[in-house]
Image (cartoon, helix red, strand yellow):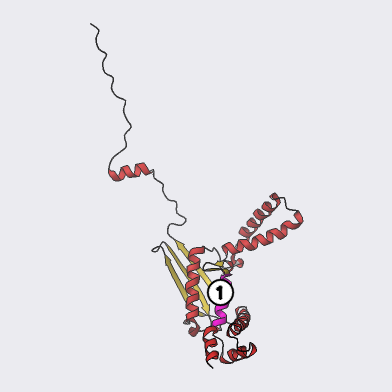
């Protein structure tokens, strides 16, 4: 019973699931944990793609550099109970922090404007051709590079800043496995102080002079002394 409770607390799985996992692995705790996580992720993937309504959740915020960067992100789940779960709150905190650091432009690939995507594909195609790649393989290369492009600009496909071996989508799926409810990121906004504004660039020397209340004057040539008279 102690092993079952320990396994339940570690994985969030039900009592019977933990009992069965220990039985299937001959009481090996590490193998039982791995087995439950594998099954949990599989179940989570089904819930993630389901039509179940998830209208509960929370809006998470994150401030960085004394307010120079701020993030708001809405993450939804199915019940108010799940919205208060430690795993859900940790997920929201981590995703908000990730957005501040990684600067995603879109939530996923479906929100990338068609014109922007086509322009990027054209650039990638020209790059591949300039590298001397055969036309027959260029399309496959472009397809692979578009995937990389999505990893750079789409939140769900970005490598998680705290663990680059996982994407944001994967850490959401792992949290679904723990909580047992559908979770989805609905929207986000990132603000950076002064972003998009033209900043005036003053001459540093002139700025110092202004602060000192003086003006830099051009040096005047020294006056010539009158020539000595011959006796």
Depth check: give the residue in front, 5 or 148: 5
Label 1 sits on residue: 171
1 versus 226 height, above or below: below
Apparent side of residue 136 relative to residue 152 in the rendered image (left or right):
right
Q: Position of residue 73 (x, y in %)?
A: 49, 71
- Which of 201/35 is in front? 35
**Number of marks drawn:** 1
Q: Is residue 170 magenta?
A: yes
Q: Seen in the image, is 212 located left or right of residue 124? A: left
Placement of 181 over or under 20, stated as above or below: above
Residue with the most extreme right position: 136
Quadrant of image for the C terminus: top left
The quadrant the N terminus occupies is bottom right
* Disc 1 packing (10 Å; few <14; some 14–19; many ≥20): some
The magenta region covers: 166-178
Residue furthest toward the top?
231
**Is residue 114 found inside the magenta-colored segment of the image?**
no
The dominant secondary structure in magenta is helix
On the question of residue 111 being in view, the answer is yes
For the point 42% across and 59% down, the residue is: 193
Instruction: Say above or below: 214 vs 19.
Output: above
Which residue appears at 52% of the width and 77% of the height?
76
Picture coordinates of residue 42 (x, y %)? 63, 80
Q: Residue at x 59, y 66 (%)?
A: 111
Residue 81 image position (x, y, % from top left): 48, 85
Q: State the residue lying farthest toward the bottom.
A: 1
Quarter holding residue 213 = top left
Provide the secondary structure element on which disc 1 rests.
helix
Q: Position of residue 158 (x, y in %)?
A: 57, 66
Between 221 and 29, the one lying in front of the other is 29
Q: Is residue 133 left or right of residue 169?
A: right
Residue 182 visible (yes or no): no
């Amino acid at each position: 019973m102690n092993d079952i409770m320990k396994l339940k607390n570690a994985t969030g799985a039900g009592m019977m699931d933990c009992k069965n996992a220990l039985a299937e692995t001959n009481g090996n705790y590490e193998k039982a944990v791995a087995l439950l996580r594998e099954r949990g992720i599989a179940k989570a993937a089904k819930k993630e793609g389901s039509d179940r309504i998830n209208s509960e959740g929370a809006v998470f915020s994150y401030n960085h550099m004394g307010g120079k960067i701020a993030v708001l992100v809405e993450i939804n789940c199915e019940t108010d109970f799940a919205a208060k779960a430690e795993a859900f709150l940790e997920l929201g905190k981590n995703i908000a922090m990730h957005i501040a650091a990684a600067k995603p432009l879109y939530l996923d690939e479906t929100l990338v404007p068609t014109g922007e995507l086509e322009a990027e594909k054209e650039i990638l195609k020209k790059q591949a051709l300039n590298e001397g790649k055969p036309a027959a393989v260029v399309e496959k290369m472009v397809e692979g590079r578009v995937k990389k492009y999505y990893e750079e600009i789409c939140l769900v496909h970005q490598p998680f800043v705290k663990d680059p071996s996982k994407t944001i989508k994967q850490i959401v799926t792992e949290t679904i496995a723990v909580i047992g409810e559908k979770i989805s990121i609905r929207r986000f906004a990132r603000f950076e102080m002064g972003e998009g504004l033209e900043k005036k660039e003053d001459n540093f020397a002139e700025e110092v002079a202004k602060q000192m209340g003086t003006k830099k004057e051009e040096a005047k040539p020294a006056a010539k002394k009158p020539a000595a008279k011959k006796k």
